Image: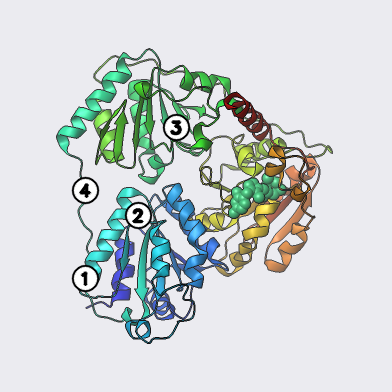
Amino acid sequence: MPTLASALLQGLKDHGAREIFGIPGDFVLPLYKVIEESNILPHYELSHEPGVGFAADAAARYHAGLGVAVVTYGAGAFNTVNAIAGAYAERSPVVLIAGAPGARERSSGFMLHHQARTVDTQFAVLKEVTCDQAVLNDAATAPAEIARVLRSARERSLPVYIEFPRDMVAAPCEEVPVLPRTEADPDALAECADEIVARLKTAKSAAIIVDIEIRRYGVEEQVAQLARKLGLPVVTTFMGRGLMENAPDVVAGTYLSAAGDESINRLVEDADALLLLGVILSDTNFALSQRVLDPRHTMLAIDREVRIGHHVYHEMPLEALIGALIARAGTGRTRKALARGAMRYPRDLKADDTAIMPSDIAAAINDLFDKHGPMPMTADIGDCLFTAMEIENTALAAPGYYAGMGFGVPAGIGVAAATGRRPLILVGDGAFQMTGWELGNCQRYGLDPIVVLFNNCSWEMLRAFQPESAFNNLSDWHFADIAKSIGGHGERVATRRQLVEALDAAVKRRGKFSLVEVMLPRGVTSDTLARFVSGFKAAREKKA
Ligand SMILES: Cc1ncc(Cc2csc(CCOP(=O)(O)OP(=O)(O)O)c2C)c(N)n1
Ligand SMILES: [Mg+2]
């Protein structure tokens, strides 16, 4: 009979987990021993728990499966709260497993180390940023509890929390079952799909907008198939940038409203039927829109619900809905596929001795991908994320909605570990100061990401909104000089020629991370961020 620890690890693997990220502590040492000795899942240790959470989140996004983070009680678990909150906001199915005191310790009468207000404060805090939870304090019920929580993570595509008291690790217990999926009611599904297809077919101008859930449920190819059958263009949201990278024939571009391409804005804002698949109706996705989305023309499928006009279909899994739509799409008049939007991506950067502007970085990366092939990307918050909008539609994991800094580098490590591919990481100097040092862990795992660090010695995104504040001025940390001492290669570049050469050399350099520190002038932003800021200010004046 397995132990509770080995049953949990096998259960994670059976539910789609492929690796574990973590930092041990005395409340998880027994569990961590089983993780290491059982080899059921590979494990990667990082240096600070926010990075553990970001890496597990990015792995979940790229797997379209479960990410797993294992941390110690209290100090470790509370350190993950922001990363798990970001995973919740952006619907990433991370399984957070935290150690906890055993039964005897709980009743010892002592305040325990790492304990906050009460022994259960950890559970109370993490309950707020997860969709389901279990405390494994009874070996008889634990397998069913774990199965329920892991199914919730998969079906809701949201983080879950498992608390593992350290005296339960070796408890004999049954294997963790994989519960049957919660299916849609077939009549409701048929009625919903009929209604959507009828609306799309009778509309004068229709489009499909996609966001992160189509990646989380692994249905990007099906969405492309649906768009082709219906002859409709697909537009991604800001948050959904990089989705359907393999379907350039149907993806017209990214809807950035006032900050974006006018031909894309017309597709969305002039439509009398919009099918939103997996779209988060957030300020970062729609706040700058010239028009509020009209519910009479909008059909929104997210979080297992479909909202059409003012009525809602419940328990409607996205993959089942898209299958039902595809089955109906080909029967009626199909619209000629709309030519792709006029999205122009900067290319052919002149490798001369002029200073580098943020949008030059996008051109240099587009040229690099044309020459060496695309790389999976992660980006942090800051102008690097807006610059990423100017890079040809490539797989991208970034906190585009939650907008928390520190994600970029640990997420890149998570992608490298999860996919075995080499990521390109975009990060600003402010965000690098937070979690960029996790690069020091690449050497122990032989990972060799390429990091493009936007060094404007500034919190430039804040300055763009509040230019009068001197607190946005950061000092120059000379990051490239530090790269070697933490196991990588660093190069500082200040001209476009140096940038092109450094990127080329980085692609050829394997076995260690390459940090390309790009010096940028303060007060200058990418074209996209400049448009976003002016659009934001215009929208704010309009509302004032
Ligand atoms: C965890 C957290 N704390 C503060 C903030 C608030 C913020 C949003 S953008 C920004 C400046 C980013 O500076 P960086 O140098 O990385 O990039 P750039 O603007 O291109 O110069 C801050 C401080 C957020 N979003 N998350
Ligand atoms: Mg900066």
For image coordinates 46% across by 73% down, the residue present is 72
Q: Earlier in the sequence, mark 1 or mark 2?
A: 2
Rendering coords of residue 292 (x, y %)? 47, 25
Of badges 3 and 2, the one in the foreground is 2
The residues bearing labels 1 and 3 have C-alpha atoms spaced at a distance of 45 Å
Determine which residue is flagged by label 3: 247
Of badges 4 and 2, the one in the foreground is 2
Q: Earlier in the sequence, mark 3 or mark 4?
A: 4
Classify the position of the N terminus by image quarter: bottom left
The residues bearing labels 3 and 2 have C-alpha atoms spaced at a distance of 32 Å
The residues bearing labels 4 and 2 have C-alpha atoms spaced at a distance of 16 Å
Of badges 1 and 4, the one in the foreground is 1
Relative height, residue 99 to residue 419 (above, below)? below
3 and 4 marks in contact (CB < 8 Å): no
Left or right for 544, reference 80? right
Relative height, residue 14 to residue 63 (above, below)? below
1 and 2 marks in contact (CB < 8 Å): no
Determine which residue is flagged by label 1: 141
Q: Which mark is residue 131?
A: 2
The residues bearing labels 1 and 4 have C-alpha atoms spaced at a distance of 21 Å
Circle 3 — which element? loop
Rendering coords of residue 448 (x, y %)? 60, 58
For image coordinates 37% across by 62% down, the residue present is 161
Please tell me in which quadrant of the rendered image residue 259 appears: top right
Q: Determine crowd level at label 3: few under 14, some 14-19, many 20+ residues with C-alpha closer than 10 A.
A: some
Determine which residue is flagged by label 4: 182
Left or right for 190, reference 165? left
Q: Kindly give the residue lying farthest to the top in the view shown.
A: 204
Please tell me in which quadrant of the rendered image residue 513 appears: bottom right
Question: Quick one: 251 or 96, which is closer to the camera?
Answer: 96
